[in-house]
Amino acid sequence: MKRSVVRVVGGLSEGSGFFVSDNQILTNFHVIADEPSPKVVFPDGHFTTSYRITANKDNDLALLYLNETHPDKIFHWVSPQTLQINEPLLAAGYPLGTDLSGEVTINKGNFSAVRHASGFFSDYVQTSINLVQGMSGGRSFLYLL
């Protein structure tokens, strides 16, 4: 899990992202807004620049495309519809961006519900996990006990 989450540095913002395929990283749109070439910083400190972005501002999502592939970094998740109320979850990301050095931060919480907001194309997973600035674009995972 730790190796699939990366830092994403936009023009005026920093956040987190995660691999959804071997060369695509999903993050929040507000993390990369106003930055045509966001930087992707890997857990080992090396970085690369996204060569293409597909984004949806209204749903606050952005897909960053990388030239190189990283098949070992894809984290496969379970469908939120299979989760039970109070099932343990983890959230992984880089709070406070580059102001806080070190490896990915992992916060624990529980699953609450899947909610739908009118006007949005996807549902939302509601949890008890506390997130701080910089965790945007990060990842929530099913925590298996």
Image: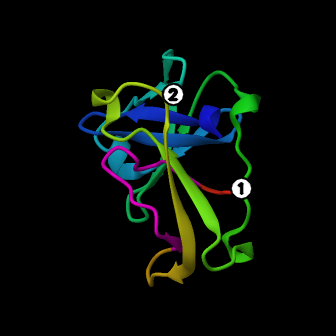
Give the CA distance from mark 2 to mark 1.
26 Å
Disc 2 marks a residue whose amino acid type is: Tyr
Q: Horizontally, is 85 left or right of 94 in the view?
A: right
Coordinates of residue 65 in the picture (x, y in percent): 57, 34
Tell which residue pokes out farthest to the left in this image.
12
**Residue behind mark 1:** 77
Mark 2: which secondary structure?
Answer: loop
Is 21 included in the stretch rendered in magenta? no
Q: Nearer the viewer, residue 133 or 145?
A: 145
| Highlighted range, magenta | 121-140
Q: Return the residue at label 2.
A: 51
Q: Residue at x 71, y 55 (%)?
A: 77
Q: Which mark is residue 25?
A: none
Q: How many marks?
A: 2
Image position of 104 with respect to 140: above or below: above
- Residue 53 in view here: yes
The residue positioned 52% from the left and 63% from the top of the image is 109
Q: Residues within 10 Å of mark 2 (few under 14, many from 20)?
A: few
Residue 21, image x, y percentages:
70, 40
Dominant secondary structure, magenta:
loop
Q: Can residue 122 be seen in this snapshot?
A: no
Residue at image x 67%, y 57%?
Answer: 143
Asked if the residue at tag 1 contacts the one at tag 2, i.e. Cβ–Cβ closer than 8 Å, the answer is no
